[in-house]
Image (cartoon, rainbow, N blue to C red):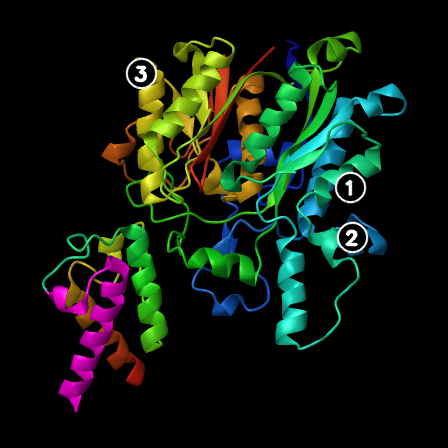
């Protein structure tokens, strides 16, 4: 099987408009969660989120592009521009036919839907923009990246709620591993911060009105974020032959289903995904130095995730550093695994262990080293990133420095 | 009049909970807890939604920390009292 490495990364999220500013904000423990700004926010009970402030679509795209690009596509394109530029790859000729795009999203063009439902139901208009369908479809972002860069290999979009990005990256990893592609653009994007997006989430009563505090005894729910992170996954021999800078190697991936409850997490399903990701390429639990947790800051997730980590790692769980960066950038739902992989890469590449901020009180049910509040500088061999979705779909990806 | 309204609130709440618990209203006592009636956490969230719709009130409830919410769901009686208070507060 082919080895797979990461040779480019790009992002836009509430912490920063690119990777450098995002990783710096993570290392500083910056909280990018604040008051939401959009129409009718006053009618919401939940009025905070990790919103990308100061973003102006016109600064990045032409008017005709904006007509076709929902914000989730815009974010994915911005992230992929940065990733491809860093990789130094050009896709003319044969490489284009061996390169594809697999992205994760949960809501796809949700803002486009929200706006156009308003138009027809609230404003009573009988006409919507002709590009509503190509703008809202979940594969729009993947397709536009393939069009912009001439990527003619396997491309599709994965929707598994909060695990979408991790599932997408797992597909990309396996496509290169198996020889079906040489290079894959992968990651995820989400843009649900609009009235309808938050209103739907409010109903579940799992959102925090005042902040995201993963693993903290005072936690009271999740906070949404938005944005994208996209990576260049590349066949190791291909990357080596062209002398590429390698950020990290992808060394394991696994996915499991709880087959139990549509919203409640399940320790066994989560633990099995972690264990299988390690078994994928024979990683010892002791070699795992950092876990980027799913860490949503709901009462249930954090407790069950800590138990699952103990279950999967055994005694090694006492040594591993575990943090949830969601306290800083919010929960990007289908895009969250992408942004969180940035933290996993920073851990294995630079030894930057992102903290779990807003941590004020230990919870005995979360008795792991959650790297409270302050980042650490420590070399780690292997990092894994967890994603556990509604619907009981779990996906875990493992990285190491090369 | 006040007494009738109170009865009405109680009956309506019991009807809502009975539907979630797959029980007849007569099988529900005010002293019962939701747990005893087999209403799980998602069932609680649905009950609260139905209560908000029925009485046109906003129920302050967070499933992450039910005990910290200002809405006491520890028994049917406590829910009735909390809803009566919300209705009263709304009138003022």
A264 within the magenta span: no
Looking at the image, is A301 positioned above or below residue A49?
above
Say which quadrant the C terminus of chain A sits in.
top right
Q: Would residue A20 be found to the left or right of residue A360 on screen?
A: right
CA gap between label 1 and label 3 equals 44 Å
> Do we see residue A328 in this rendering?
yes
Q: Secondary structure at mark 2?
A: helix
Residue found 80% across the figure and 11% down from its top: A242
Element class at badge 3: helix
Query: Which of pointers 1 and 3 indicates the residue nearer the eye?
Result: 1
Return the x and y of residue A104 as percentages of the image width and height: 61, 37
Q: Which residues are magenta?
A: B1-30
Which label is found at residue A314?
A: 3
Would residue A33 be found to the left or right of residue A286 on screen?
Answer: right
Q: Using the image, name the chain to which the residue with label 3 belongs.
A: A
Q: Is residue B2 magenta?
A: yes
Of labels 2 and 1, earlier in sequence is 2
Question: Which of the numbered marks, if any, corresponds to residue A68?
Answer: 2
CB within 8 Å, label 2 to label 1: yes
Q: Tell me what residue is drawn at x 76 percent, y 35 percent.
A: A81
Circle 1: element type:
helix
Q: Main secondary structure of the magenta part?
A: helix
- Subunit of label 1: A
């Amino acid at each position: 099987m082919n080895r797979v490495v990461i040779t480019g990364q790009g992002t836009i999220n509430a912490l920063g408009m690119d990777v450098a500013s995002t990783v710096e904000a993570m290392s500083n423990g910056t909280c990018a969660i604040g008051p939401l700004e959009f129409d009718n926010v006053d009618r919401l009970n939940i009025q905070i989120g990790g919103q990308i402030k100061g973003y102006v679509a016109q600064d990045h795209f032409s008017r005709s592009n904006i007509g076709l690009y929902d914000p989730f596509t815009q974010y994915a394109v911005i992230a992929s521009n940065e990733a491809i530029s860093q990789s130094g790859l050009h896709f003319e000729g044969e490489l284009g036919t061996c390169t594809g795009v697999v992205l994760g999203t949960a809501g796809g063009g949700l803002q486009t839907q929200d706006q156009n439902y308003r138009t027809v139901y609230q404003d009573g208009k009988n006409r919507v923009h002709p590009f509503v369908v190509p703008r809202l479809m979940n594969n729009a972002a993947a397709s536009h990246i393939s069009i912009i860069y001439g990527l003619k290999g396997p491309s599709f979009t994965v929707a598994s709620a909060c695990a979408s990005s991790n599932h997408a990256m797992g597909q990309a990893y396996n496509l290169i591993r198996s020889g079906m592609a040489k290079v894959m653009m992968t990651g995820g994007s989400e843009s649900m911060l609009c009235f309808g997006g938050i209103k739907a989430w409010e109903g579940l009563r799992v959102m925090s009105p005042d902040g995201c505090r993963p693993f903290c005894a005072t936690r009271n729910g999740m906070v949404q974020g938005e944005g994208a992170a996209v990576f260049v996954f590349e066949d190791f021999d291909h990357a080596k032959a062209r002398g590429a800078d390698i950020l990290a190697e992808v060394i394991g991936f696994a996915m499991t289903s709880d087959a139990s409850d549509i919203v409640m997490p399940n320790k066994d399903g989560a633990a099995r995904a972690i264990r299988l990701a390690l078994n994928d390429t024979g990683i010892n639990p002791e070699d795992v130095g950092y876990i980027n947790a799913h860490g949503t800051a709901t009462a249930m997730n954090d407790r069950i995730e800590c138990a699952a980590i103990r279950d999967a790692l055994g005694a090694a769980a006492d040594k591993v550093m575990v943090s949830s960066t969601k306290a800083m950038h919010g929960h990007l739902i289908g895009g969250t695994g992408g942004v969180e992989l940035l933290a996993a890469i920073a851990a294995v590449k630079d030894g930057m262990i992102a903290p779990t901020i807003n941590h004020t009180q230990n919870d005995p049910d979360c008795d792991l080293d959650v790297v409270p509040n302050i980042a650490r500088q420590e070399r780690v061999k292997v990092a894994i990133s967890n994603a556990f979705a509604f619907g009981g779909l779990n996906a875990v990806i493992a990285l190491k420095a090369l | 009049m006040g007494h009738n309204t109170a009865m009405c609130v109680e009956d309506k709440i019991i009807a809502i909970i009975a539907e979630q618990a797959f029980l007849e209203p007569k099988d529900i006592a005010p002293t019962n807890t939701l747990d005893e009636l087999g209403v799980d956490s998602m069932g609680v969230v649905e009950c609260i939604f139905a209560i908000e719709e029925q009485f046109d009130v906003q129920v302050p409830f967070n499933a992450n920390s039910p005990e910290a919410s200002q809405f006491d769901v520890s028994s049917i009686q406590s829910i009735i009292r909390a809803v009566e208070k919300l209705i009263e507060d709304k009138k003022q």
